[in-house]
Image (tube, rainbow, N blue to C red):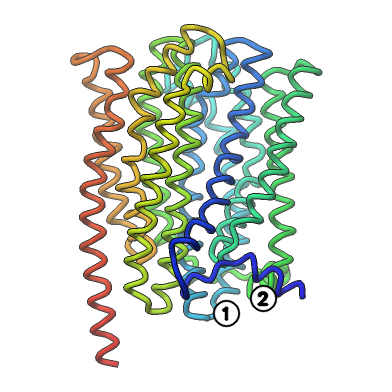
Amino acid sequence: MEIRSREKKQVDMIHGPLSGKILLFSIPLIASGILQQSFNAIDVAVIGHYSTTQAIAAVGSNGPIISILVNLFLGVAVGANAVIATYLGQKNHNSVRKSVSTVAIISLVSGFLLMFLGITLARPILEAMSAPHDVIDLAEQYLRIFFCGMPFMMIYNFGSAIMRSVGDTSLPFYSLLVSTLCNLFLDWLFVAVFNLGVPGVAWATVISTGINAAIIVYFLVQESDPVALSLSVRKWRLSKPDLKKMLQIGVPAGLQGMVFSISNIFIQSAINSFGADAIAGSSAALTFEAYCYYIITSFCAAVIAFTGQNYGAGNYDRCKRVLRICMLYSIVIGGTCNLLIAWYGDTCISIFSSSPEVMRYATIRFHTVLVFQCLASFYEIPGSYMRALGYSVTPMLLTVFGTCVLRLGWVAIFRGIDSSFHGLLIIYPISWTITGITVMTAALIVQHKVFKRKAVQTTIS
């Protein structure tokens, strides 16, 4: 009975209509992403109401630094998702067990490695970003404490990748919901009651992330075979072939995210030159951009899971439909949310600060970046589609050039063209448009190549 009830939570990706199933799969992912982003948003909001503009800037401006150190390993989680989904489509349960065991080992190793790197490199990276003197010490405190929770964060992200592969996105959402509520309570307790300030919100995040990791591990060990049996520590084995496949798909995706974050660090450095109000306003607006971006990344995860299983099962026409449906959902739902938040911009920003200057900078970012964010769907969705088909280097190279190189070039020359805050940020919609055209074109070429090769192999066999 327990196994049957858990299987109902899983989505059958290789049979029946796709539109409803993709939406059913993605909505908990979107909600999970929003909750995950809420860890930092709650930190910023609580600090904003009980502390200074400098404290808001210290907590809110660390996103690019965290991303640059975390993205490589999150890319490997994408690779794990694709590999496990393909094995499930092939009904190769023995390979699923080996892959899950490999993922368990990777999550622990990567978590402790990230903790060491974050604690060690926090100050040098902040100095390289030209963090203002009235912000840098608080920002360093926040980062050093935040990275103590990296082992917990990696356990959750790799664990949720396993659950996405089997079609279950609701339980990771419940785990995040509990930990987010814990984070909200602890933020208030540590800052408003104990007056711990920036270190308080950092420790609240670490504790809540630990709760999150414990819950996701509990859910995983309750899963039916072939997942649960692989999570016994005595049965952990590192499968080199599966690790190689995960790295082949995941490392390019992770490197893309790292380089993407590097470009954002250069933009953040330019934003820092406008002062603490600009940093705080940009950080508040960036919180809502992150919320909306999770809509796009959730449909990216759906593309990987649904394409991976159908590709493994040989349902190639179904793979094409997955791409079209996920693209449509991402643009329509993401674009609608972008416009709604921009329309109610003052109300949204007032959650974090009532300072007129902070709100002015946030509004500029809303109107320059957020309203065009759905354009990123045109490279994120087809890029994930190619990864599910085993092509991860191609979207990485195109995205690195189309977003990162263009943005770095713009940061270097923008002051000679338009030294305003708006002039700095306009590169976002420009880079999204150029990258989207190139990646979508590449995805259609790869799709034709892969399915034609598979058709020939099937005919010969």
Which amino acid type is shown beneath numbered disc 1?
Answer: His
* Residue 93 image label: 1
Label 2 neighbourhood size at 10 Å, few (<14), some (14-19), many (20+)?
Answer: few
Expressed as whole percent of the image width and height from the top left, the position of residue 197 reads 70, 17
State the residue position of label 2.
Answer: 225
Q: Residue furthest top?
A: 356
Q: Residue furthest bottom?
A: 461
Label 1 neighbourhood size at 10 Å, few (<14), some (14-19), many (20+)?
Answer: some
Quarter of the image with the N terminus in it: bottom right
Circle 2/circle 1 CB separation < 8 Å? yes
Quarter of the image with the C terminus in it: bottom left
Expressed as whole percent of the image width and height from the top left, the position of residue 55 reads 60, 15
Taking the spot 53% from the left edge, 22% from the top edge, the residue there is: 348
* Residue 20 image label: none
Taking the spot 76% from the left edge, 17% from the top edge, the residue there is: 192
**On screen, residue 106 above or below 230:** above
**Near-viewer residue (214 or 281):** 281
Q: Identify the mark nearer the N-term, 2 or 1.
A: 1
User: Spatial distance from mark 2 to mark 1, Cα to Cα?
Assistant: 8 Å
Locate residue 333: give its quadrant: top left
Number of marks in the rendered image: 2
